[in-house]
Amino acid sequence: MKPRDLQSNQTIQQRLKKEFESIDGYEFAVKRGEILDEGKVISNEDAGRMLLTFDLNEPWNSHQKSQIFDEYYSKIFGKPEVNAQRIILVYEILSVVEEQLDQIDHKQYAYYSATKYFLLYVISKIMQKDEVGKAVYTNKLKIVLNSKDLNEFKRIITDILRNNIIVDLNYFLKDEKNSTFDYKKVSKNTTELQSLCMELLKDYEKDLKRAKAKSISEQWKAFKEKELAKNSNIY
């Protein structure tokens, strides 16, 4: 029996499954062969890989599926902030990343299985340095149960990925000094992946200072001001 199946009846997995049952549109699969068809199905294996990247900041280990329910299990799922809403949040952010992969010019790298987790890692770092982003990241600002808020946050992440992060990633990949870029090797190398992330974050910070990019907070506050004005006009 595989580690995932052994953990399927464990207290944490059953708690998460119960939490998912109270949220419309999503289901949580805790074991292989489970048939669920009443919404977006998120397997605990996929949740583990996402949280390993988003919470533990280890995208270079995202390929180690067998370790999610073994060595990394308590680190990933045992944190008190890990609940159904957090898993859905990370799932929705990753779905935005997946939608933008075709913007990467290097198509082999774009659709390599680890690439989306690297970009999720970059987004988590951006969120942690931003006032509103950090509030969402730390569960202080809850947006999952409000479809308007969730959709706006996804739009903001799309904007940052499409107009800044992936643009800079494409420049990096086109640079002659990176002509020997081995995406498979880099994706599993802690030092090289951290270095690439830092380079993209520096470029993003420059874009913010030069007004070539709008921060999460800037866009979120503009969205809330529009909502407030719209509601005021109704009354």
Image (spheres, rainbow, N blue to C red):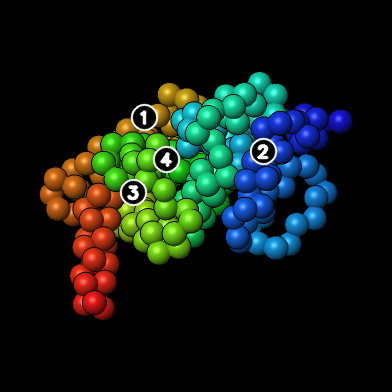
Q: Which x, y percent locates residue 161? A: 36, 53
Label number found at residue 165: 3
- Give the quarter of the image for residue 230: bottom left
- Are the residues at dot 2 and dot 4 in contact (C-beta closer than 8 Å)? no
- Label 4 neighbour load within 10 Å: few <14, some 14-19, many 20+: some
Q: Which residue is mark 4?
A: 139
Q: Which residue is mark 2?
A: 15
Q: Which x, y percent locates residue 225? A: 21, 63
- Are the residues at dot 3 and dot 1 in contact (C-beta closer than 8 Å)? no
Front residue of this view, candidates 12 and 124? 12
Q: Residue at x 44, y 59 (%)?
A: 146
Q: Is residue 46 visible?
A: no
Choose mark 2 or mark 3, whichever is in front: 2
The answer for how far apart the CA atoms under marks 2 and 3 are is: 36 Å
Q: Earlier in the sequence, mark 2 or mark 3?
A: 2
Q: Which residue is mark 1?
A: 195
Furthest residue to the top?
71
Helix, strand or loop under label 2: helix
Q: Earlier in the sequence, mark 4 or mark 1?
A: 4
Q: Earlier in the sequence, mark 3 or mark 1?
A: 3
The answer for how far apart the CA atoms under marks 2 and 1 are is: 37 Å
- Label 1 neighbour load within 10 Å: few <14, some 14-19, many 20+: few
Q: Residue at x 40, y 64 (%)?
A: 148
Q: Is residue 21 visible?
A: yes
Front residue of this view, candidates 171 and 131? 131
Q: Amino acid at mark 3?
A: Ile
Q: Earlier in the sequence, mark 2 or mark 1?
A: 2
